[in-house]
Image: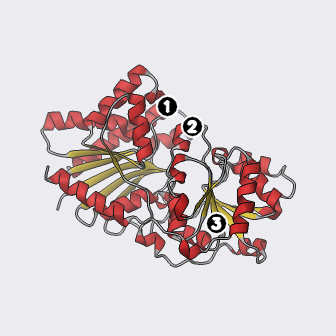
Amino acid sequence: MEKILMLIRTPSLAFDDRVRKEARTLSKFSRVVISSFENRHDDIDSEYESVQVIRHNLKTRMIFPKGNLVAFKIIEMYMRYVSKFLDEKPDVCWIHNFESIGMVYILRIIKHLTRADFKVVWDQHELPPSSFLKSKWKKIFYRKALSLSDMNIVACDERAKYINNCLNDNVQFTIINNYPDEVFYERKAGEIDPSIVTWLNGDEYFLCQGGMREDRAFFEIVQAAIKEKVKVIFVGPIQESLNIKLKKFDGHSDYIFIKPSVPQLELVNYIDRSVASLVFYKKGNMNNWLCAPNRLYQSLSRNIPVISGNNPIFQEYREVGVYISDTDGSCSEKIAKSINDFKKIRPSKSSIIATKWKSQEEKLNDIFNSKKNP
């Protein structure tokens, strides 16, 4: 059985659903080892069963907290990645995120020096920083890295087209959509936070995953909820600076509840009880505008409708339970109107078609076999 080594830096594997799905799928026909650098080691229970997970902390992060002296952290991460690679001697090295761009070059050098026969897969969860798609020399550096990788993965076709347009190239990308798997969409919903039950007092609510993010229309949704007198629960990271601003909105405590992040699989508890999910990604940057968010697919997979911004990707799901607002999220009045219109329509949940991970599982299987047998 061939071995796949995944290298990733992530806040916590417990909240990285894409890595969990890919690793579990690949483990059905390969031995998968994950070497991850995490900010916190939350419990992952059996979510990575059949996958060997080795979790680390960056020592330089303890010395230089937050965003200080990032270069030192990347150097440490690369050095430890290389050490792990040499120990494992994998058949496939699957590196995650754009920050691993240097590893593409390092692995190519190792391959040249050792004559080792292995494949490099570069899984870019986000678009590259805008400078790598504008600066002449950074574009050359990025384009070369793409050419050195055996497979380049992005989360949706729109991102692949955008990158190629910026690079004036025709790089072949593999699209792995971030659809939920059976572990998520077949999971039985549990209880929600008792304090939320008390706050709801029997009222219905709309759900916002992703926490307090201005680029995801946090304050516009707050204003719309207060205007329409509907309750909204935000689940995700809390930003204290935004929390202070929130308190300035009269009546916010009647309509807005902020719940800190919960593990990915526990989100079903909040999704299933909601009237609909609110998903807005402002057009402030292309990474946001061309995002294919987990929360969109998660809600649809649980037969919960979505009210979204007018982003290109959301438009594709208009016929299967996504109600498009006439704004990217920048206009609270238009969000309020969408909520009001939705309440009048009140669609049947059973009519919504869910999008499932199985199609991506088959794609990964086909791709992996084709790479083994070119």
Describe residue 221's horizontal placement relative to residue 249 as left or right: left
Pick whichever, 290 or 144, lies toward us: 290
* Sooner in the amino-acid sequence: mark 2 or mark 3: 3
Residue for badge 1? 130
Describe residue 248's horizontal placement relative to residue 53 as left or right: right
Which quadrant holds residue 306?
Answer: bottom right
CB within 8 Å, label 1 to label 2:
yes
Q: Secondary structure at mark 2?
A: loop
Q: Residues within 10 Å of mark 3 (few under 14, many from 20)?
A: many
Relative vertical location of residue 143 with respect to residue 2 in this rendering, above or below: above
What is the x, y in percent for residue 51? 32, 64
What is the x, y in percent for residue 224? 77, 54
Q: Residue furthest right?
A: 250
Amino acid type of the residue that numbered disc 3 sits on in the rendered structure: Ala
CB within 8 Å, label 3 to label 1:
no
For the N terminus, the quadrant is bottom left
Q: CA distance from mark 2 to mark 3?
A: 26 Å
Image disc number at residue 285: 2
Relative vertical location of residue 178 with respect to residue 141 in this rendering, above or below: below
Q: CA distance from mark 1 to mark 2?
A: 9 Å
Amino acid type of the residue that numbered disc 1 sits on in the rendered structure: Ser
Residue for badge 3? 276
Describe residue 135's horizontal placement relative to residue 194 as left or right: left
Q: Residue furthest top?
A: 136
What is the x, y in percent for residue 160? 39, 41
Describe residue 8's horizontal placement relative to residue 280 as left or right: left
Q: Residues within 10 Å of mark 2 (few under 14, many from 20)?
A: few
Q: CA distance from mark 3 to mark 1?
A: 33 Å
